Amino acid sequence: MSNNFSEKIRSLSEHYRSYTAENLSEIVQIPSFSGEEKNVIAKLKELCQDAGFDEVYIDGLGNLIGRVGNGPKKIAFDAHIDTVTVGDEKQWKTPPFSGQITEKLVLGRGTTDQKGGAASMITAGRILKELGYGGEFSVYFTFTIMEEDCDGMCWKYIIEEEKLVPDFFVSTEPSSCNLYRGHRGRMEMEVSFEGVSCHGSAPERGVSAAYKAARGALAIEKLNDELQPDEDNFLGKGTIVVSQMSAAGPSQCAVPDQAMLYLDRRLTWGETEEMAVQQVKDVIPECKDVKVPYYDKTSWKGTDFGQDLYFPTWKIERDHPLVTSGEEAYRALYDKNVKVDKWTFSTNAVAVCGRHKIPSIGFGPGDEDQAHAPNEVNKIEDLVICSAFYASLVYSMEENL
Ligand SMILES: [Zn+2]
């Protein structure tokens, strides 16, 4: 990026170092488990308004959407602001919702996964406003809900129901300030088995659904070994595992006539829902059916929404303009190259890029291994880098349009 903005952006993000850390601390102090995000959404709305955003509103599901700029193209920066629960509280050295700020860190549940991204986004919006941004982009900042339960569902809603369809998408999930351009997809499957029950004293009279499921489980173990990586080995190989199993019949003294295997499947590039279901049917010919379960839940706003538990794989090319613009923005700010890589876990980009093919990247503060862990922390330095990067990316994209 050759423009004069990068120096200015870097010093503004530095100037706002404690503002960003304090905003993160404030939103960490408001618990927001999936489906219970009402209070944190209200706080974020206030923060976006104070930062001078041009528009701030809550959508039909309960996501908070902020906008800076009014250009014809749309770029969206996204942070989910729900968190997982705290787990065993005895394992936390400071209370999970303290939001304590130390010299280098902000402490608490959600600091890294992923309210840190949200805090950096607010500062980026503030910086764009201060620079008087009025370019080609409407810059959306989305603070989304229910991600931990059903990744991407919030964005399925934004695109399909709210009809807000960005041209480019940036997930701010933790990437250690690396630039990510994909991750594996995932899905869940329920395999059912049917047998014929009979008295347990004479099992030869019946057909055991439990033994069918047991043979099925071993077939899944073998299938996992046979799965192949993607062509360029960027995402690596898919996996499949039995995550639950059950069997039941008319009594504990009977041959069971019903059984179930629950499967967790990770999908590499080129592996689709239909293909993965067919694979299971092929290796377990004894099964009755293979289903992808449906998830639905009522949001904090009282809206019912749901989807199949299928989260498509996504990636974009190494030389996509969104990737190269990100590289340029980073170089202009810090005079060094950003690492381009992929996530291990799953993000809202499954809906945006996986389902709706909208070019996406990831860049976020904090390390992936902090997610869902006790004593979760985020680094204030990462927050500063991210607020600068998000603002710079807008200008950098503009040059490459
Ligand atoms: Zn997350």
Image (tube, rainbow, N blue to C red):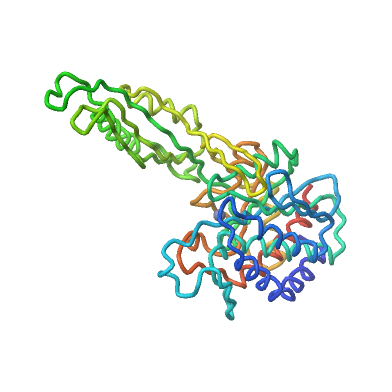
Residue 242 drawn at (x, y percent)? 35, 39
Against 226, residue 30 (above or below) is: below
Q: Image quarter for residue 43?
A: bottom right
In the image, taking residue 317 as reference, residue 295 lies left or right, namely: left
Q: Image quarter for residue 355?
A: top right
Residue 66 drawn at (x, y percent)? 77, 54
Q: Extreme bottom residue here?
A: 103
Observer-nearest of 87 and 104: 87
Placement of the N terminus among the 4 image quadrants? bottom right
| Label tally | 0
Against 306, residue 396 (above or below) is: below
Q: Extreme top residue here?
A: 205
Residue at x 76% of width, y 52% of height: 140
Against 273, residue 105 (above or below) is: below
Residue at x 69% of width, y 50% of height: 63
Is residue 316 at least partly visible in the picture? no
Against 18, residue 37 (above or below) is: above
Residue at x 74% of width, y 63% of height: 124
In the image, taking residue 68 as reference, residue 161 lies left or right, namely: left
Is residue 378 at least partly visible in the picture? yes
Q: Quarter containing ligand 1? A: bottom right
Observer-nearest of 367 and 212: 212
Residue 173 drawn at (x, y percent)? 59, 56
Residue at x 71% of width, y 67% of height: 333
Observer-nearest of 105 and 205: 205
In the image, taking residue 229 as reference, residue 22 lies left or right, namely: right
Q: Extreme left residue here?
A: 201
Residue 396 drawn at (x, y percent)? 76, 56
Q: Image quarter for residue 104?
A: bottom right
